[in-house]
Amino acid sequence: MAEPAVSAPILALEHLSKAFGALKVTQDVSLDVRPGEVHALIGPNGAGKTTLIAQIAGATAPDAGRIRFAGADVTGLGMAQRARLGLGRVFQISNVVGAFTALENVALAAIVAEGRTLSFWRPALADRAALEKARAMLERVGLAARVGEAASALSHGERRALELAMSLVQEPKLLLLDEPMAGTGRAEGERLTALLAGLKGRIPILLVEHDMATVFALADRISVLISGALAITGAPDAVRRDPVVRRAYLGEEDAV
Ligand SMILES: Nc1ncnc2c1ncn2[C@@H]1O[C@H](COP(=O)(O)OP(=O)(O)OP(=O)(O)O)[C@@H](O)[C@H]1O
C-alpha cells in the first residue's frame, strides 16, 4: 500500500450513515480532520454528535459509509484495534485507577501503550523509563506538583488533566475529546482550555464540546451537525455567520 501523502487527512469520514429504527441519527456525513488542526464538532442537543463519535471510536458500527484513519480503512475494526493504530479517546472512557498515584496512572498508560500485559503492572511500576516519561507528561499538563497524589484525591479539573496525560503518553495520532469542559468550574475550565491550546498544532484534535467559548477559542474549523446531517464545515467566522446554524441554535444565538 502506498504511503499517504503528508497533507492527507488523519481522519476521514465518507458518507457515514446510521439509523436507530426510523430515526436517522447520522445522515450521509463526510468530514475530515487535517494534520495539526483542532476540528470542533458542534450541534444542538440530540443532533447526533455522540453517535458520530461512537462510530469513529469503533463503539458503534455505521450502517453505510467508510472511516479512514491514518491512511487505513478502519470501518470494520473494533475499538481496541483503532486505539492501537493511534486513535486516542479522552474523557468519556476513563481508565484512571483512583488508588494509584497520578504518576503510576500515567506510567501504566505508557506501559500498556507499549503492548505489555496487565499482569506485569506491579513490577512495571518500578519501570524507570515509563516513570520518567510519565513525570515529563505530568509536568506538561501542569500536574508536576501532584505526581505523588492518589488520583482519587485530585480535583475534577486535575483529573481531566491526568486523563489527558494518560492519553498523550500513548502518543496518539489523533485525540478525540468528548466534552472536556463538562462538569468543570470556570477557573478549571479556563486552565483546561489553556492546556488544550498548548497542544494546538502538535496533535490533531476532534473536539466535541457544548461550551462555545471553548470551541471558538480552540477550533481551526468547525463542523455543525443538525438532525444527524452536516450543515456546514468551515472556519469559525463563517460558521458563526451561517444563517442555518443560527436558526438551529435559535434562542441560543448569543452562544454562537
Ligand atoms: N442506542 C440508541 N437507540 C435509539 N436511539 C438512540 C440511541 N442512541 C442515541 N439515540 C438517539 O439518537 C439521537 C442522537 O443522539 P446523540 O446522543 O448522538 O446526540 P448528541 O448530539 O450527542 O446529543 P447531546 O448533545 O444531547 O449529547 C437522539 O435522538 C437520541 O435519542
Image: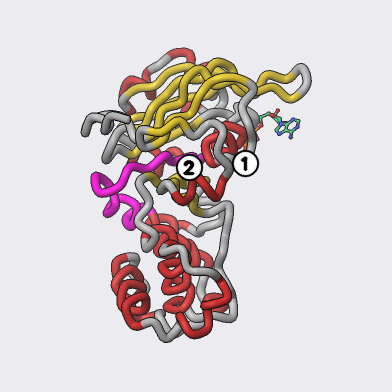
Q: Quadrant of the C terminus?
A: top left
Residue occupying the far top of the picture = 243
Residue at disc 1, secondary structure: loop
Tag 1: amino acid: Ala
Quarter location, residue 133: bottom left
In-front residue for pair 111/204: 111
Q: Which residue is mark 1?
A: 59
The residue closer to the viewer here, 186 or 199, is 199
Image-quarter location of ligand 1: top right
Please provide percent x and percent y for residue 117.
Answer: 53, 69
Q: Quadrant of residue 201?
A: top left
Query: What is the span of residues highlighted in magenta in the rendered image?
Result: 193-211
In percent of the image, x 58 and y 42: which residue is there? 78
Label 2 crowd (10 A; few <14 / some 14-19 / many >=20) = some
Kindly tell me whether mark 1's CB lies below 8 Å from ligand 1. no
Ligand 1 contact, mark 2 (Cβ < 8 Å)? no
Indicate the position of residue 143 as horizontal and vertical percent values.
Answer: 37, 73
Indicate which disc residue 252 carries.
none
Horizontally, residue 233 falls left or right of residue 50, namely left
Q: Secondary structure at mark 2?
A: loop
Tell me what residue is drawn at x 42 percent, y 74 percent: 107
Furthest-left residue in view? Answer: 6
Q: Viewer-proximal residue, 150 or 237?
A: 150
Question: Was residue 209 drawn as part of the magenta stretch in this picture?
Answer: yes
Q: Indicate the position of residue 62 as horizontal and vertical percent values.
A: 61, 27
Which of marks 2 and 1 precedes in the sequence? Answer: 1
Is residue 93 covered in magenta?
A: no
**What residue appears at the point 32 percent right and 78 percent down from the top-left corner?**
129
The residue under label 2 is which amino acid type? Asp
The circle drawn on residue 211 is 2
